[in-house]
Amino acid sequence: MSIREDVAAALTQEGRDHLRLRIGLVCASIAAAIVTSAASGAARPTGVGVLFTLALLAALVPDGHIPTILIAGHLVFWFMTVPRPASAAAIAPAVVTAILLLAVHLLSAAATVWPPGGRIPRSAARRWLRQGGAVAVAAVAVGGLTALLVAAPLPAGTLPSLAAVASLGAGAIAAYRLIAR
Amino acid sequence: MTVAADSVEEDGRSGWLPTPNVVRAVSVALVTMSVGVLGRRADLVILVLPLAVVAAWSMATRPRHAPSVRTTLGPTALPEGSALTFTAFVSVPAGAPDVAIVLASDPFFDPVDGTWTLCADAGPDAGSVTLAAPIAARRWGRYRTGAAVPAVTGIFGGFRHSFRPIGETEVVVLPGKESFASRTGMPHPRGIVGANRSPRRGQGNDFAAIRPYGPGDRLARVNWAVSTRTATLQVSEMHADLDTAVTLVVDAFHDLGSTGGVGGAASSLDTAVRATTALAEHYLRAGERVGLLVLGASDVPPLTARSGQAQLRRIQDGLARIVPGTVRGGEDDATGALLARLQPGGVVLLLTPVISASALNRAYALARFGHTVLIIDTLPPAALTAGRLTAEDLAAIAPFTNPRAIPTTRLAWRIRLLEREGQLQRVRASGIPVVPWRGPGSLDEVLRQLQRRARAPRVARR
C-alpha cells in the first residue's frame, strides 16, 4: 500500500464530520493569524507560518496540548505585533480574532468530544453552533463597550487596577475549586 | 434468540472529570486577562473573553449525577453473513448532552453503517438515549466481540464521565452453506430407513422384478395385469430403501489461502467448512445419517452419525469451533481411535487441501478397512498457479517476514505443488477418488462410479 493510499485510508477512518472539524480548525487559525497580521500593519510571514504549522499539528492531534499551544501562540503573536488600540476602530480586529480563537477552541473541543469515525448528530451540531454563537455575540457586545471606553478613556487609577486583579484572582480560585471538585 | 447483556452504573459526582478543553479555556483566559489588566491592554482581555465565558458556562452546567449504561449484544449465535445488533441504553443527567460509544473493531465483523463509533445527542435536560449498531458477521467461527467504551460529555466538552469498558461477549458464527445438490444415491446403504435403493429386495419404492406370489406377500403388491396374462398370481417386487452413514472428515491441520469472509476470498478451510455444511444439510435432508470428525483441531468433539435437522445444528456448531493446527498428540490419537470405530461400509467424505500427510494416511487407512472414501480437494484454485500468486496470497499460504524471501517462497510452493500432484496420483492409483469442490454436482459423477463399483463382485479380505 502506497503512502497516498495509507493517507486516504486514514482520512476515511476519521470520518467526514471529523475532517470538517479539523479543516475548520485550520481555517479559523489561519484567518486569526491573517487578521492579527493585518492589525499589526505589516506582513508577518514567519509568525503566520509558525501558526499555520501549529494549526496543522493541532488538527492532527486535537486531544493533546497542541491546541492550547496554538491558542497561546496566537495570543503571543497578537501581544508582540499589534500595538495597544488607540481608537474605537482598533478594537474591531481584536473582536474578530477573539471570535476566530473561540472557533479554534470549540472545534478542537468538538473533535475530542466526538470520536473519529462517528457521525455527529445534526441536533448536537446545531446546539454547539447556537451556544458558540451566543458566546460570540457576548464577545461582540463587550467589544462594543470596550470601544466606547477607548473612545472616551477613564482616568487611570490604582484602585480599579487592583480591583480587576483581585477579581481575576477570585475568579481563578473559584475556577480551581469548581474544576477540582 | 440469545442476547448477552451488560450494564455499567456508577454513582457520584467525582466521576465527572475536567477535560483538557476546560483546563485550556480557564488557564489561557486567566493568564491573558492578568497580562491584559496589568499591561492595560483591553484588546487582550477581549481576545480571551469568549474562552472565559465558555469556561464559566462549562463549570456552571457541570452535571451533578452519574450517568448509567446498559448494553445488549445479540443474537449470540447466527449464520455468517447475517447481522447482530449492539444496543446501548444510556441514561444521562442534566448538562450532559453528548454521548459517544466506541466499539472495538474486529476483522471479521463489519458495522452495517460503516462506523464503529456511535454518537447521540441527549439534549440539555436529563433523559435517556438508545444507540444501536447492526454488525454483520463475515466469517464463521467463535469470537469474543462487543467490547465498547462509552463516554458522556458536558456542555462544550468541559467535563467527561468515562465508564469502565464494556466487556466482550462470545458470539458463535455458524458457517454458511455453499450451494450443493446431488442426484446420485449412496454406494453402500446399510441402515434401516432411507432414500437409497438397496441391492436387497424389500418394501421400498423402486421396482425390482415380478415374481410369483408367496406366503407373506401383501395384497397391495399383486400385479393384476401380469397375473391375468399368466393365469397365476404375480407380485411386483421392490428394492428396499435404506440409509447410509456419511462421515464428513475435515482436515484442519492447515488453512491455506487468504480469507475474506462471505462474498470474499475463501481459504482452504473456508471452502471445507462451507462445503461440509452444504453436504451435511443435503444428506440429512435426504434421510442419511451424518457424522463429523475434524482432524488437526482441538476442542471439536467428534459427532457420531445421526439423522435429523438437529444434527445439522450440531455439525455447524462443531465446525464453528475449528481453530486450525491446534491439535495435540493425545487428541489426534483420540480422533484416530474414533475413526477406527467407524462401521465398515460407510461413506467417508474427506475434505482436505491435500497438504497434510497425516490426513492422507487417514484416508488410506479408512479405505483399507472397507470404507468408501472420497477425497474432496479444497485447495483454492488460485493457489494452484504458484507463478501468478500475489505477495499477499503467497503470504496467506506460506507466511514470510522478509519481502526478499518472496521468490524463494514461490519456488518452494511450486515444488510443494509438484509433490502434492504426486501424492494425488498415488491416492487415485490406490482406488480413492479425488474431486475438487465445485459446488452443485461436484460429487455426482464419482458417486455414480462408486455405486457401480459397489454392485460389482469383488474379493474380500478375510
Image (cartoon, rainbow, N blue to C red):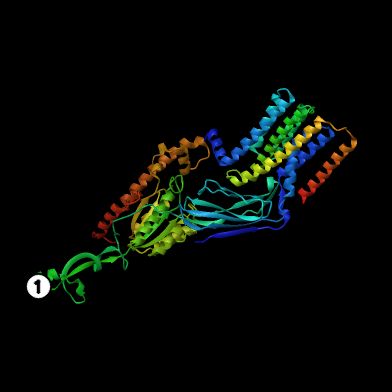
Where residue B53 sits in the image (x, y, percent)? 74, 42
**In the displayed structure image, the side of residue B350 where residue A163 appears, left or right:** right
* Amino acid type, callout 1: Ala
Neighbor class of circle 1 (other Cα within 10 Å; few <14, some 14-19, many 20+) is: few
Where residue B199 sits in the image (x, y, percent)? 24, 64
Where residue B191 sits in the image (x, y, percent)? 32, 66
Give the residue at x 20% y 71%: B221
**In the displayed structure image, the side of residue A153 where residue A1 appears, left or right:** left
Q: Name the residue under label 1.
A: B231
Q: Which of these two is toward me, A72 or B339?
A: A72
Extreme top residue here?
Answer: A42
**In the displayed structure image, the side of residue B304 where residue A57 appears, left or right:** right
Considering the image in quadrants, where does the C terminus of chain B appear? bottom left
- The number of numbered badges drawn on the structure is 1
Chain letter of the residue carrying label 1? B
Query: Which image quarter: residue A33?
Result: top right
Q: In this view, does B461 lie above or below A68?
A: below
Extreme right residue here?
Answer: A158
Report if residue B131 is visible in the image: yes
Q: Which of these two is toward me, B333 or A25?
A: A25
Query: Which image quarter: residue B303?
Result: bottom left
Q: What element carries label 1?
A: loop
Where residue A147 sits in the image (x, y, percent)? 78, 32
Give the residue at x 72% y 28%: A36
Q: Which of these two is toward me, A161 or B389?
A: A161
Query: Which image quarter: residue B250?
Result: bottom left
Report if residue B458 is visible in the image: no
